[in-house]
Amino acid sequence: MYRNHQYDMDCITWSPAGRILQVEYAMEAVKQGTPVLGLRSKECVVLVSFKRAQSELASHQQKIFKIDDNMAIGISGLTADARVLADYMRNECLNHRYVFDSAMNVGRLVAQVADKSQQKTQNSSKRPYGVGLLVAGCDEKGPHLFETCPSGNYFEYYAMAIGGRSTSAKTHLEKHFADFETADVDVLVKHGLEAMNKTTSSDQSLTTKNTAVAVIEAGGKYREISGDDLQKFIDGLEKKAEDEPMPEEPTPAAEGAAPMDTSG
């Protein structure tokens, strides 16, 4: 009876089913984005991302951005929107350091980003940010890992994965997250790469070119693991069986939708 295009022209119009479609579209962009995951212990927090290339002639897209010496973000969704939020977060960290001569509290900055995202859902001339963030950082309270959503929600986790095919990565993290609290950096990186390895298809494998790993330690600074050090972790991954089926992400279908005509 009702068509979606009557209610998805702005983000302040509710559909008859009680849904705000533009926010759902932004959330779907995150679900179909490149997978990224994070995990933390008492001493450090680790971000792992899969960098996808548009073609063999293109470079791999950066999915982890440094915000401050004690903070970084991993993104899934629209990279352009992520760069806008990254610039905002960097400016907030610079202003805080200039005024108070100290690093910004991670939770406070995440709350500001959530407020900024939520404001985009209250104005008909704006659209929600189509990107999800995993914000990793260390402050005086220790390591933190937050997730922000286009709707303005944010949550803190011990371990989390977002993006396409992230369900299998979450399964691995849920099985082992009880061991993360006392784990050292090498163990966290190993678990992160093993979880990321489960998100790739059978004809893909993790390499130093398509994988990015960032580490932030309590009392230390942001650093990336690359080159030979990253290759050592990748060499230690379990080899996937060739006949192992990849779990497919469920694709939500609209009720009463007409089947696609493939006869043409």
Image (tube, rainbow, N blue to C red):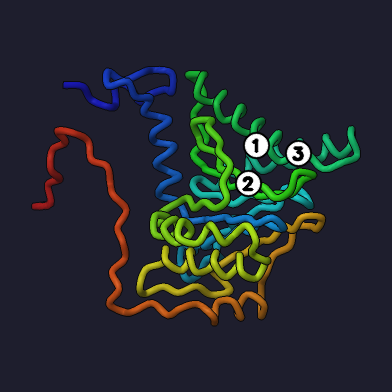
Q: Position of residue 68 (x, y in %)?
A: 76, 48
Secondary structure of the residue carrying numbered label 3: loop
Label 3 and label 1: CA atoms lie apart by: 9 Å
Please give the name of the residue rendered at 63% of the width and 39% of the height, measured from the top-left corner.
85
Q: Nearer the viewer, residue 181 or 171?
A: 181
Disc 1 marks which residue?
110
Amino acid at the residue labelled 3: Asn
Amino acid at the residue labelled 2: Val
Q: Position of residue 37 (x, y in %)?
A: 53, 56
Which picture quadrant has residue 40?
Answer: bottom right
Question: If you read the primary sequence from the N terminus, does the residue marked by circle 1 or circle 2 appear first?
Answer: 1
Q: Residue furthest left?
A: 263
Disc 3 marks which residue?
105
Secondary structure of the residue carrying numbered label 1: helix
Amino acid at the residue labelled 1: Val
> Could you tell whether 219 is left or right of 191 in the image?
right
Disc 2 marks which residue?
135
Rendered position, 130 above or below 126: below
Label 2 and label 3: CA atoms lie apart by: 12 Å
Q: Which of the image's four quarters has the N terminus?
A: top left
